[in-house]
Image (spheres, rainbow, N blue to C red):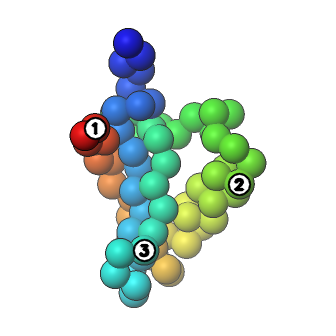
Amino acid sequence: MDTSSSNQFRLCFRALFEHGRGFAFPCAADGTVNLDGLTERSRLNYLYARAMVGRELDHPAVEPVVLQ
């Protein structure tokens, strides 16, 4: 079973003005995102989300991934 930290947490950027919207990316417990592990589109979305903090998105939060 793979228990790497990148599968147990996600970094969430929530929209400031549109409830329920935002971005989430797999990350380590400290919020580090492995950019090399993302697809090109996800990498661009991550860079966009970081650039929009305080403008369109709230500061990111590390959240545990809940498996059902």
Three-letter amino acid code of the residue under disc 1: Leu
**Quadrant (top left, top right, bottom left, bottom right) of the N terminus:** top left
Q: CA distance from mark 1 to mark 2?
A: 24 Å
Above or below — where is 21 with respect to 41? below
* Mark 3 surroundings within 10 Å by alpha-carbon count, few (fewer than 14), some (14 through 19), many (20 or more): few
Q: Residue at x 45, y 55 (%)?
A: 24
User: Which residue matches tag 3?
Assistant: 21
Residue at the disc numbered 1: 67
Query: Label 2 belongs to which residue?
Result: 41
Query: Residue flagged by tag 3: what amino acid is it?
Result: Arg
Say left or right for 13 vs 66.
Answer: right
Q: Report which quarter residue 21 is drawn in.
A: bottom left
Q: Quadrant of the C terminus?
A: top left
Q: Is residue 67 left or right of residue 4?
A: left
Q: CA distance from mark 2 to mark 3?
A: 17 Å
Kind of residue at disc 2: Arg
- Answer with mark 3 or mark 1, whichever residue precedes in sequence: 3
Horizontal and vertical percent for residue 51?
59, 67
Horizontal and vertical percent position of residue 15: 42, 76
Q: CA distance from mark 3 to mark 1?
A: 21 Å
- In this rendering, the answer to whether 43 lies above or below 66 is below
Quarter of the rendering containing residue 18: bottom left
Secondary structure state at the residue bearing disc 2: helix
Is residue 8 visible in this depiction of the protein? Answer: yes
Q: Earlier in the sequence, mark 2 or mark 3?
A: 3
Residue 34 drawn at (x, y percent) = 57, 34
